């Protein structure tokens, strides 16, 4: 039997949404207990449809050791600092905050697909779009 790991995903923009979809589509031992997203994004809508709690940062912190890993897909240095401060203030040294590089590593174990970068330039966004179109057979 595989060990289950309770995870949260912070940031359900373009990349966070893809990451959520991938985790939900596989039997990989990752149990998404909640997500953090302030905007009305497709990822937030998906989480709500799947019955995954959408929480504030303070609500996430209150879950304590009920969350093993928080995948930070926000791309925000301010968020990274704030979440770490709040974890420290709550004396939670158990819950790990995984940056996008760790999320990319996890992704590589779960999928052969390409996960776009969070911090993409306009040119990178264009390349990402072309790669997705190529995979869909729209361009060759």
Image (tube, helix red, strand yellow):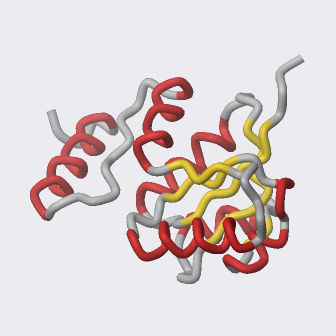
When the figure is inspected, residue 76 is found, relative to residue 112, above or below; the finding is below
When the figure is inspected, residue 98 is found, relative to residue 135, above or below; the finding is below
The image shows residue 72 at horizontal and vertical percentages of 52, 58
Q: Nearer the viewer, residue 10 or 138?
A: 10
Image position of 47 (left or right of 67): left
When the figure is inspected, residue 16 is found, relative to residue 56, above or below; the finding is above
The image shows residue 119 at horizontal and vertical percentages of 27, 59
Q: Residue at coordinates 59% horizontally, 53% vertically from top-left?
A: 97
Q: Quadrant of the N terminus?
A: top right
Name the residue furthest top. Answer: 1
Quadrant housing residue 138: top left
Q: Quadrant of the C terminus?
A: top left
Quadrant housing residue 35: bottom right
Name the residue furthest right. Answer: 1
Q: Residue at coordinates 68% horizontally, 66% vertically from top-left?
A: 87
The image shows residue 60 at horizontal and vertical percentages of 75, 70
Image position of 9 (left or right of 2): left
Q: Residue at coordinates 38% horizontally, 41% vertically from top-left?
A: 115
Question: How many numbered discs sit on the rendered protein?
Answer: 0
The image shows residue 103 at horizontal and vertical percentages of 50, 42
Q: Nearer the viewer, residue 94 or 52?
A: 94
When the figure is inspected, residue 107 is found, relative to residue 65, above or below; the finding is above
Quadrant housing residue 133: top left
Q: Residue at coordinates 72% horizontally, 49% vertically from top-left?
A: 7
């Amino acid at each position: 039997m595989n060990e289950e790991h309770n995870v949260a995903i912070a940031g359900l923009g373009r990349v966070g949404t893809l990451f959520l979809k991938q985790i939900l589509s596989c039997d990989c031992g990752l149990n998404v207990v909640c997500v953090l997203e302030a905007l009305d994004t497709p990822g937030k809508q998906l989480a709500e449809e799947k019955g995954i709690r959408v929480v504030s940062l303070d609500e996430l912190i209150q879950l304590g050791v009920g969350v093993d890993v928080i995948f930070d897909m926000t791309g925000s240095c301010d968020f990274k600092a704030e979440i770490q401060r709040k974890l420290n203030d709550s004396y939670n040294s158990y819950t790990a905050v995984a940056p996008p590089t760790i999320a990319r590593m996890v992704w590589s174990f779960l999928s052969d697909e390409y996960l776009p970068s969070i911090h993409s330039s306009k040119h990178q966004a264009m390349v990402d779009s072309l790669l997705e179109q190529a995979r869909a057979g729209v361009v060759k």
